[in-house]
Image: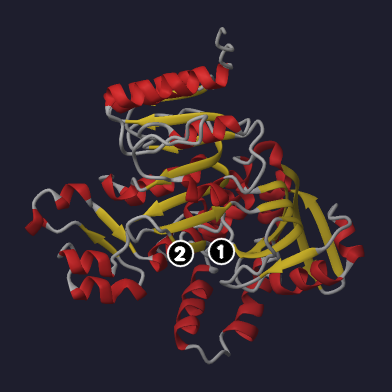
Amino acid sequence: MADSPKSSTDAAADSLAEFADREALKYQSFELADGQKTEGHDRSYLNDVIFSDDLTGKRVLDIGCFLGFFCVESARRGALATGIEPDRECARQAAEITRLQGLDAEIICGDFETLDFGEDRFDVILCLNVLHHMYDAIGAVRKMMALCDERIVIEFAAPNMRDLITGRQSPLAVALNTLPVVMLGSPKRGYDALSRTHMFTGKAMRVLFNSMSNAFEPLEITRSPFKGRLLLHARKRKISHLAVVVGPTSSGKSTLFGKLKDDPAMRARFGLNGGTWHGIHGHDIDLPGGRVDGAIVHYDLLRPYRRSIRTFDRDPRNDLMAVADKVTVITLMPPLKVLKERLIKNELSGFNLKSRKRQKHILKRYEDPGFLKSWYGQWFEFTDGFGDRIVGNHVYVSHGDTETIVPAADWQALFDRQSV
């Protein structure tokens, strides 16, 4: 009796088993059609995190993909998967494993840290048990943040009891685990300085994603079952419409911010219609998870002045503009005389000595119209960089019962008139 022909899936599984045996593949385990698995670590415990959302048509980047396990799993779920692997032999094996399973995934032999992605972006970025091998790990994380449109999953090495027992870390290193600390590999253990270039605590990652950036929701960090690693899940904020109320110190930002937040009629004057509008004022960003219909942010035009951020594009608060589908900018520009009067009356009477010192300095700078004009110019140049994302760019002047709204394109003429 003739044997029944094998299905394409069975044939692929047989070929994969033969290939894995011939190449002695052992790091990542792959499941075969008969339920057996190739040798290696079972990494499927990450599937619930990585594949929690529908990946159909999504662009997935796996950094340091090794044998391509997560490229295979992503492609199976309809994703457009790309794997990067610096080891030429592993990249070849990953490409062959993908082919043997009849899946379409791009495997690039290259170094993520030096690779130029041009205009490419990715919906989901994976960096699993790889970050501690990178020479500029912080730079690599920030590069992932810039390339990501939706989610980042990082499995990273942190000081733990396992390393203390094996002598890889000192008791002090483990004790520092409750602080935002980044540690370098120990030179006393030779190769460890290279194999573990950086180790991050969970709080250090929170600083990177939620303090040095405002583009991501609060991190989810859990313990990975793999070698005591930590597992980070970062979701990029999604804001349908963002309104930015911006002006120098004592320009009336808080007053207008409150009106816009509480008064639908006032919002309608600037094209901020419908939905729920959340306010962002101060250091904390209290937004719900997932897509937000509308948000209004209070922003000080002089926030970068004499502070380490220096420029608008280096300020994490302005990341909110980059994650919004639409942005309306409302820039307050009261007459210079009114600005100085308000600053003397409202700001210099506070009890915060550090704040009062800064306000006194700013009041002195207000004597020079060119100082503020320069900062307004930098602001409008910065907002121009967002292109079509800016759906409204207004200059707002309120003095007494008089309100004036003019296009941002006319700001210089308005400023010159009011500075006389």
**Residue 96 occupies which quadrant of the picture?**
top left
Q: Residue at x 53, y 74 (%)?
A: 363
- The crowding category of the residue bearing disc 1, from other C-alpha atoms within 10 Å (few below 14, some 14 to 19, many at least 20), is many
Which amino acid, mark 2? Arg
Quadrant holding the N terminus: top right
Q: Is residue 305 visible?
A: no
Q: Is residue 254 left or right of residue 172?
A: right
| Circle 2: element type | helix
At label 1, the amino acid type is Pro
Question: Is residue 394 among what the camera can see?
Answer: yes
The quadrant of the picture occupied by the C terminus is bottom right
Q: Residue at x 43, y 31 (%)?
A: 83
Q: Nearer the viewer, residue 154 or 78?
A: 78
**Gap between marks 2 and 1, in whole Å?**
8 Å
Q: Residue at x 43, y 43 (%)?
A: 143
Counting from the top left corner in percent of width and height, residue 21 is at 31, 26
Nearer-N-terminus badge (2/1): 2
Q: Residue furthest top?
A: 2
Residue occupied by mark 1: 218
Q: In the depicted view, which residue is nearer to us: 273 or 94? A: 94
Above/below status of 122 relative to 209: above
Local secondary structure at mark 1 = loop
Coordinates of residue 104 in the picture (x, y in percent): 54, 21
Query: Where residue 206 is drawn, which disc sits there?
Result: 2
On screen, residue 217 above or below 348:
above
What residue lies at 60% left-to-right and 73% top-to-bottom?
282
Nearest to the observer: residue 376 or residue 275: 275
Q: Could you tell me if the residues under marks 2 and 1 are in contact, i.e. CB atoms within 8 Å?
A: yes
From the viewer's side, name the closer residue of 99 and 277.
99
- Could you tell me residue 190's position as x and y percent? 8, 51
